[in-house]
Amino acid sequence: MAHTSGTRMRPDIEETRQHYEETACRTVFQALDGLTLLAGLYLAISPWVANFTPLGRLTVNNLVTGLAVAALAVGFATAYGRTHGLAWVTPIIGVWTIIAPWVLYGGAAPGRAVLNNVVVGIWIALTGLAAAGLAASGRGRGRGRTAHVNGTRPTI
């Protein structure tokens, strides 16, 4: 039995990777990655900046989710062609950041903690949605063309 490469089975994979790499090189996308990285880092340190460290669960939550957002932003900035499948995670973390004070403390969190999380959560959700939208734009281009791999027609 002959093995075929994944590219031979999915001839559009190289075009898709190329599209994501081109998208990652655009100035707008790099700016969004930078803003997402900064938002993630701020979220991680926000309990100390906004002075709500006595809220232990929210402090740990913001630290962990902030570092996760920062790690995703670094991954998107350095290897978006390979990490684009995780683009949907950033807006979800943003939404979680917004609702976390109510989920973790049932409305008993101080106003500065709630305001901090709402503002940063909205920022993370919007930058994540914008980055995912930029990457998805133009993704369907080239459909209808027959791609050739190693000089042969692909078998689907």
Image (cartoon, rainbow, N blue to C red):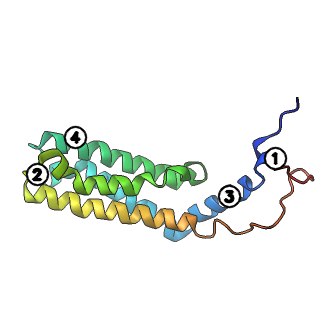
Foreground tag (2 vs 3) = 3
Up the image or down, 110 lies above or below 26; here it is above
Q: Residue at x 54, y 50 (%)?
A: 85
- Tell me, yes or no, whether the two marked residues, 2 and 3, touch with CB atoms within 8 Å: no
| Quarter where residue 130 is shown | bottom left
Kind of element beneath mark 1: helix
The residue pinned by badge 1 equals: 8
- Residue shown at the point (72%, 59%) measured from the top left: 15
Return the disc, 1 or 3, that comes first in the chain's sequence: 1
**Crowding near pointer 4: few (<14 within 10 Å), some, many (20+)?**
some
Disc 3 residue type (three-letter): Thr
Pointer 4 residue: 60
Task: Give the residue pinned by disc 2.
Answer: 51
- If you read the primary sequence from the N terminus, does the residue marked by circle 4 or circle 1 appear first? 1
First in sequence: mark 4 vs mark 3? 3
Sequence-first disc among 1 and 2: 1
Q: Which is more foreground, mark 2 or mark 4?
A: 4
Determine the residue positioned at 15% across, 58% down: 114
